[in-house]
């Protein structure tokens, strides 16, 4: 048993940290978040060309780095900490995972290679306009017409949906319900009948879109896996993405702790730094507890995710590990955001200080892929039913 | 990162598991799942015999170096030992203070003579120890110790006077390790000594403290001209604080995974009850049970990190700093859930006049977890100061 980063993993983490500290400054984030695409295209190209992060866990045979989920989550933690605005989560955690689990060899060769080369970004469109994490929340439909498929409907909360080159769309066969009849399709964004619009949301650092599908005609080559059988695969993709998102939440929680502690050491009231008051110290101690416990949950879940992708003995724990991490880290992030704002006092309520960016990201991430109560209920089903 | 144990470790797991299975039978069976925190007053004599049984199998002091009578087990196998011990429901150890605290301190700071005199009795499970730290005026402010140690030249002995409190197992113990002031003019952590004191002598009186459970596991210990041999001070007069704090490093670590296995046993009881009485169908209870379950899992992941992630310089890593606050709070929440899950029936006693059910006992006893061994508030101060570099409170 050796539950720590290897030297190589530590190096990947440290490299990500120093790179992001340089490029994902508050100024850069604020510039990106008010742009229509939501990120700096030149920075993304630099990440793809110089850092090769988009290829982190793509197997080498498709041009990737062939690393694992521990490395991926280590990077996500840093991206969450520096609030990186880039189509990384959408392309890698949603897109690549979907392709790895659902696509056939030709589809992988085509799309994964394009992603590796930085030519393609991707995302996953699965729920309807009301959001949700369950099979019932998939509302777009398809019908088979000869050899072709025709998609109809609207997908909501599509991360980076406005800019992604490839939309991986979950749709259900017309008339089906629950977990049956669900299929996954690879839909190039320029396919006829696809229209996309920005979905304005509170968290400006992660762009959401609505995607309308009107008589979108697709060939067999666009179908990922077997028609109607996609739910188990999609469920697994969502669990993998959940673990990556939890890692991002840990990074954000850490940054909030660090900035609140730093501020409390500088801010003097009653002739002493407010960091010397137990009322502040105890809040900070609880924040650190949440960060460290969340990090332990994410490290474990990352190991399980690795085994899930490679067929190890812990693969069966994926669902539980994802829910444990997401339930804990969702609450931890939002609580830390609230406490960081409180410790900052008045300035924490200003647009100028960054606390609100994290406060907003925390709530948005909490509700993505199921909130804490949702994941606790999933755990309850395992132990109580 | 690697989460699995080696085949060699798994073989060791089988060895201890089968020994426990074979030896937790017959008359010993009644001790299963007994004698843990909140239940320490039960079966004291039988549990003392169990210590010796363990010693016969060489299952005491498994982490101690071989030269001192231990097995010198690597960390992984110590973890396995404590996990299997708890999984089997083997009884709460009456020897744990000697094995976990007194012995390691003597090994680290004691003289050769002290090692020869005291370690064999701990390993053999024949001599039990208790800890004399807290006093009525020295709780969270532990360094405010008033107990005095005066060296009597004519007797060639230390003479101890004062009062200790919250001393668990004092009435069962052969020895007590005590911090006492050797320099009467000193303050706080300066001028203290660390003494090994025989309990069976005229100057030592033990008085049980009746707890909110109606039972007594803790005691007050009074020293009235109690005597301690000149050879039985660990380190020099004035080193007491350093020696006492040296123990803290031993208090965390490998036994935590065993503790968690015991927690798991308790949570399993609550889950079984919830399924039986229908609380498992209540959405609010489902949330609370799942929350406790997942936080216990995280406690385990955190310990795995703690055990793998040693800085090598004896300093506590961040995940180790949070540990006490984390588990104590968790356990308190579990106790609350244990009665809540029973609804109104959870209020009904096992028997008159005031015999508690196991879960009622748990519910009440866990209130001490967030107080002893550093209150939650002191833990938060330590985390803030050592983990986050926040300044100490100005002196009053």
Image (tube, coloured by chain):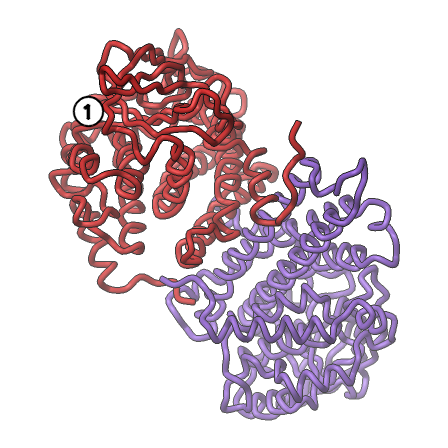
Chain colours: A purple, B red
Q: Is residue A141 above or below residue B38?
A: below
Q: Quadrant of the N terminus of chain A?
A: bottom left
Q: Residue furthest top?
A: B353
Residue B90: percent from the left, percent from the top?
25, 36
Characterize the local packing of mark 1: few (<14), some (14-19) or many (20 or more) Cα atoms within 10 angstroms. Answer: some
Residue B206: percent from the left, percent from the top?
32, 13
Q: Is residue B234 above or below residue A83?
A: above
**Residue at 11%, 39% in the rendered image:** B56
Residue B327: percent from the left, percent from the top?
48, 40
Q: Does residue B69 appear left or right of residue A143 in this picture?
A: left
- Whether residue A373 is visible: no
Question: What's the chain of the residue with tag 1?
Answer: B
Residue B68: percent from the left, percent from the top?
18, 44
Q: Which residue position is annotated with label 1?
A: B46
Q: Quadrant of residue A369?
A: bottom right
- Whether residue A151 is visible: yes
Q: Quadrant of residue A162?
A: bottom right
User: Is residue B7 or residue B67 the one in the foreground?
Assistant: B67
């Amino acid at each position: 048993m050796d539950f720590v980063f290897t030297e190589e993993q530590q190096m990947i983490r440290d490299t990500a940290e120093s790179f992001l500290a340089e490029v994902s400054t508050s100024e850069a984030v604020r510039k990106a978040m008010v742009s229509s695409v939501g990120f700096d295209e030149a920075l993304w190209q630099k990440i793809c060309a110089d850092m090769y992060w988009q290829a982190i866990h793509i197997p080498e045979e498709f041009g990737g780095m062939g690393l694992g989920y521990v490395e991926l989550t280590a990077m996500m933690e840093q991206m969450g900490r520096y609030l990186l605005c880039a189509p990384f989560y959408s392309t890698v955690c949603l897109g690549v995972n979907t392709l790895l689990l659902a696509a056939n060899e030709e589809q992988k060769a085509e799309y994964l290679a394009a992603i590796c080369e930085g030519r393609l970004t991707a995302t996953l469109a699965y729920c309807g306009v009301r959001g949700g994490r369950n099979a019932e929340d998939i509302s777009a439909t398809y019908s088979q017409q000869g050899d072709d498929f025709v998609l109809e409907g609207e997908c909501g909360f599509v991360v980076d949906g406005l800019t992604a080159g490839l939309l991986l769309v979950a749709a259900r066969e017309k008339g089906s319900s629950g977990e049956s009849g669900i299929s996954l399709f690879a839909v190039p964004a320029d396919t006829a009948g696809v229209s996309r619009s920005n979905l304005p949301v509170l968290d400006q650092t992660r762009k959401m879109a609505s995607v309308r599908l009107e008589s979108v005609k697709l060939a067999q080559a666009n179908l990922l896996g077997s028609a109607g059988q996609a739910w188990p695969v999609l469920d697994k993709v969502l669990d993998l993405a959940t673990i990556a998102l939890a890692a991002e939440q840990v990074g954000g929680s850490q940054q909030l702790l660090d900035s609140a502690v730093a501020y409390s050491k500088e801010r003097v009231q009653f002739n002493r730094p407010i960091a010397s008051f137990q009322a502040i110290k105890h809040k900070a101690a609880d924040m650190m507890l949440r960060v460290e416990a969340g990090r332990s949950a994410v490290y474990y879940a990352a190991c399980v995710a690795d085994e899930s992708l490679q067929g190890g003995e812990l693969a069966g724990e994926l669902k539980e590990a994802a829910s444990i991490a997401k339930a804990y880290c969702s609450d931890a992030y939002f609580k830390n955001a609230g406490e960081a704002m409180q410790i900052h006092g008045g300035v924490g309520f200003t647009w100028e200080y960054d606390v609100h960016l994290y406060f907003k990201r925390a709530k948005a991430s909490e509700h993505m892929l199921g909130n804490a109560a949702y994941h606790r209920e999933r755990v309850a089903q395992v132990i109580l039913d | 990162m690697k989460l699995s144990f080696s085949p060699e470790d798994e073989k060791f797991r089988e060895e201890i598991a089968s020994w426990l299975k074979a030896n937790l039978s017959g008359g010993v069976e009644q001790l299963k799942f007994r004698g843990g925190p909140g239940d320490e007053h039960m079966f004291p004599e039988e549990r003392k015999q169990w210590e010796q049984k363990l010693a016969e199998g060489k299952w005491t002091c498994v982490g101690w170096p071989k030269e001192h009578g231990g097995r010198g087990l690597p960390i992984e196998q110590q973890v396995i030992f404590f996990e299997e011990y708890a999984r089997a429901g083997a009884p709460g150890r009456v020897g744990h203070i000697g094995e976990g605290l007194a012995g390691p301190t003597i090994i680290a700071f004691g003289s050769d003579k002290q090692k020869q005199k005291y370690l064999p009795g701990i390993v053999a499970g024949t001599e039990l120890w208790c800890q004399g730290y807290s006093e009525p005026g020295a709780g969270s402010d532990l360094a405010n110790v008033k107990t005095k140690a005066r060296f009597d030249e004519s007797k060639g002995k230390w003479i101890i006077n004062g009062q200790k409190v919250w001393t668990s197992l004092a009435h069962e113990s052969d020895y007590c390790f005590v911090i006492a002031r050797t320099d009467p003019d000193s303050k706080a952590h300066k001028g203290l000594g660390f003494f090994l004191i025989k309990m069976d002598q005229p100057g030592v009186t033990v008085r049980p403290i009746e707890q909110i459970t109606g039972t007594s596991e803790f005691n007050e210990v009074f020293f009235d001209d109690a005597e301690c041999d000149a050879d039985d001070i660990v380190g020099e007069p004035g080193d007491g604080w350093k020696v006492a704090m040296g123990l803290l490093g031993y208090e965390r670590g490998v036994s935590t995974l065993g503790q968690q296995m015991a927690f798991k046993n308790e949570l399993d009881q609550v889950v079984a009850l919830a399924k039986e009485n229908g609380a498992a169908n209540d959405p609010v209870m489902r949330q609370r049970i799942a929350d406790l379950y997942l936080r216990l899992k995280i406690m385990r992941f955190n310990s795995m990190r703690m055990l793998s992630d040693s800085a090598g310089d004896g300093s506590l890593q961040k995940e180790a700093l949070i540990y006490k606050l984390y588990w104590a709070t968790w356990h308190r929440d579990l106790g609350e859930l244990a009665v809540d899950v029973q609804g109104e029936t959870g209020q009904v006693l096992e028997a008159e006049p005031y015999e508690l059910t196991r879960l009622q006992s748990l519910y009440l006893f866990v209130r001490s977890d967030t107080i002893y061994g550093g209150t939650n508030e002191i833990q938060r101060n330590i985390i803030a100061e050592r983990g986050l570099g926040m300044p100490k409170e100005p002196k009053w």
